[in-house]
Structure formats: structure tokens, C-alpha cells
Image: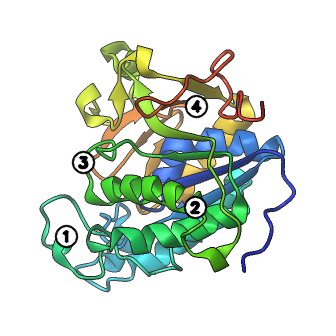
């Protein structure tokens, strides 16, 4: 039997594929809600073992050498969560249950233990247990294409979607706690107005990203919620990204991944609704608007 949900009025669950995805997409949001007294829970589906290592001094961690990057990234994620003020972060099924699948079409996609090959109901059942325990009103994850087609991001979307169904189904795992219905599911996105050529002016990195390089770009009209956590959340997001040092380089208000393409460190983070979901009432500046009434 799961324990009762913690005594927080607002409870937010985020489902991500690899360590660093949460800080890039939702770092300011997580910091803002954690500072404001909400329960923020992060579930990460893999250790990110197949990531490319940026610092030369840590190149030995790479999967084609020592293959110890996943263990190292556990520590990076822990430091990032400390920067964001998030105390509840866990790996789906426990650290190392599912391995990073690599980029779409890579040989790693075919490994039996990779997340892309995971049985959907098994993985979703593990997440449904977290949902029943923590009872979030709002769940944040990727859209159906995972933002940019990465197999683990697509699978995280599928698992999160199925877990919401299983958690609300009284017939599923009756010994796993009372059913819980998530009131709102939101998908990460970036408004097209944030990736214009003007938005990339002033990039300190040698090369600049373009709109096509940024995951999850949508028309501004599709944005349902914009979260601006202010200076505290912005600083916390930058600190969290710096904690993911094997994957991210931060320079002022800019960051780059292993591709070296500089892009703005967005401190206003945006979310869209699945098709057919009721609109978010109010000013569109609160993930929880209308869920209590």
C-alpha cells in the first residue's frame, strides 16, 4: 500500500527522459513553484548513459570508453535539484532500470534494456504508482514527438500518457493505493516568437542555434501557460544547468549542448495543452489555474 500524498495543496509532477531535460525545459518553473510551497516531483526515465561528454577531462566517462556516464549524471541531477529547491526526484523504477536509447535510428535503440524497448504498460505502471502516491493535480511532459524526435522523449510521452490512465483506473493494481485523476496534463513548448533571428542576437558562443535546432517550437497561439518565476527562478535555472556540466555549457544568459550551438536560456517557460483539453482559465500564468474549482 502506498503512503498518503504529502500535505501540499499544489502538487506538480514532471516526467523527463534524461537528466538535464528538466532544467532546460522546466528549471525556472520548478524553482518558482518549489519556492512558493508547492510539492514538485521529478521522475527521470533513464540515466542518460548515451550522452556526449563536453569537458575533455571527463571524456573517459563516455559509453564507448568506461561507460560510467550514467552514474556520474546521477550526481549532476542531484546538484541541479538542490539548485532548484526540489527535494523529491526519482528515477522510473529505480536508477538504471531503463537505459538511455541513444538518438533515433542508432544501434542502441535495439538493446533490450533501453527505454525505447520498454513494455509500455510495465513502465507506465511504475509511473502510475508515483502518481497515486504523490497525487499531482498537474503533470508536465513532452508532446507526442518528444520535442525533437528522440526515442526516449517520445517514450516518456507515451509512458506519462498511459500512466495517467492507469492511475485513475480503480481496476489497475488495486493494492497500489487509491485511484487518482490528474486534473491537467501539459506539454513543454517554445513559442515561435522566442526563436526569431533577433532572439539569437548577442550569442556568445561561436555558433548560434536557429529555430529548427530548438525542440518543441509551436505557434504562439498554441501556448496555454507561460511561467515567469522572476530573478530567483532565473538564477536557479542557470545554476541547475551549470550542474549538468557533462552536457551543458552556460555563458551568462546563454547555453549550449554538445553541438556547440548557443541559444538563450529561457526563463519564461511555456506549455501547451493536449488536443481537446479544456482551456486554462485566467491569465495563463499558473499551471494550477482552475484545478481546484
In the image, residue 86 lies at what x, y percent? 71, 57
Q: Nearer the viewer, residue 16 or 169?
A: 169
Of the two numbered discs 3 and 2 on the same chain, state the one appearing first in sequence.
Answer: 3
Q: Which numbered disc, 3 or 1, marks the residue that appears first in the sequence?
A: 1
* Mark 1 vs 4: CB contact within 8 A: no
Relative to 89, is 112 above or below? Answer: below
Quadrant position of residue 255 = top left
Of marks 3 and 2, the one in the foreground: 2
The Cα atoms of the two marked residues, 3 and 2, are separated by 26 Å
Depth check, front residue: 44 or 171: 171
Circle 2 is placed at which residue position? 167
Seen at 48% across and 76% down, the residue is 72
Q: Which residue is mark 4?
A: 267
Describe the element under mark 4 as helix, strand or loop: loop
Marks 4 and 3, the one that precedes in the sequence: 3
Q: Could you tell whether 90 is left or right of 210 in the image?
A: right
Earlier residue among tags 1 and 4: 1
- Secondary structure under the numbered disc 3 in the rendered image: loop
Residue at screen point 57% across, 75% down: 173
Q: Earlier in the sequence, mark 2 or mark 4?
A: 2
Circle nearer the viewer, 1 or 2: 2
The percent position of residue 11, horizontal first and vertical second, equals 73, 49
What residue does disc 3 label? 149
**Residue 103's spot in the image, x, y percent?**
21, 60
Residue carrying label 1:
109
Amino acid at each position: 500500500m502506498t503512503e498518503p500524498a504529502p500535505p501540499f495543496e499544489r502538487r506538480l509532477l514532471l516526467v523527463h527522459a534524461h537528466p538535464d531535460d528538466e532544467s532546460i525545459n522546466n528549471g525556472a518553473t520548478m524553482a518558482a513553484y518549489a519556492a512558493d510551497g508547492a510539492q514538485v516531483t521529478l521522475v527521470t526515465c533513464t540515466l542518460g548513459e548515451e550522452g556526449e561528454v563536453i569537458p575533455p577531462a571527463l571524456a573517459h566517462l563516455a559509453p564507448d570508453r568506461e561507460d560510467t556516464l550514467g552514474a556520474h549524471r546521477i550526481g549532476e541531477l542531484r546538484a541541479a535539484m538542490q539548485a532548484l529547491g526540489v527535494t523529491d526526484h526519482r528515477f522510473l523504477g529505480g536508477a538504471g532500470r531503463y537505459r538511455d536509447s541513444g538518438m533515433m535510428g542508432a544501434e542502441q535503440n535495439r538493446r533490450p534494456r533501453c527505454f525505447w524497448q520498454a513494455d509500455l504498460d510495465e513502465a507506465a505502471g511504475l509511473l502510475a504508482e508515483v502518481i497515486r502516491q504523490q497525487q499531482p493535480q498537474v503533470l508536465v511532459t513532452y508532446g507526442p514527438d518528444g520535442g525533437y524526435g528522440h526515442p526516449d522523449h517520445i517514450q516518456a510521452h507515451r509512458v506519462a500518457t498511459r500512466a495517467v490512465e492507469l492511475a485513475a483506473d480503480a481496476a489497475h493494481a488495486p493494492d497500489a493505493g487509491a485511484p487518482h485523476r490528474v486534473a491537467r496534463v501539459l506539454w513543454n513548448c517554445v513559442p515561435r516568437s522566442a526563436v526569431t533571428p533577433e532572439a539569437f542576437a548577442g550569442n556568445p558562443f561561436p555558433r548560434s542555434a536557429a529555430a529548427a535546432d530548438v525542440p518543441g517550437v509551436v505557434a504562439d497561439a498554441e501556448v496555454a501557460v507561460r511561467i515567469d518565476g522572476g530573478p530567483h527562478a532565473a538564477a536557479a535555472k542557470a545554476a541547475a544547468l551549470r550542474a549538468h556540466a557533462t552536457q551543458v555549457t552556460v555563458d551568462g544568459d546563454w547555453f549550449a549542448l554538445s553541438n556547440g550551438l548557443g541559444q538563450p536560456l529561457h526563463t519564461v517557460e511555456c506549455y501547451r495543452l493536449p488536443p481537446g483539453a479544456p482551456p486554462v482559465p485566467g491569465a495563463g500564468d499558473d499551471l494550477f489555474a482552475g484545478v481546484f474549482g
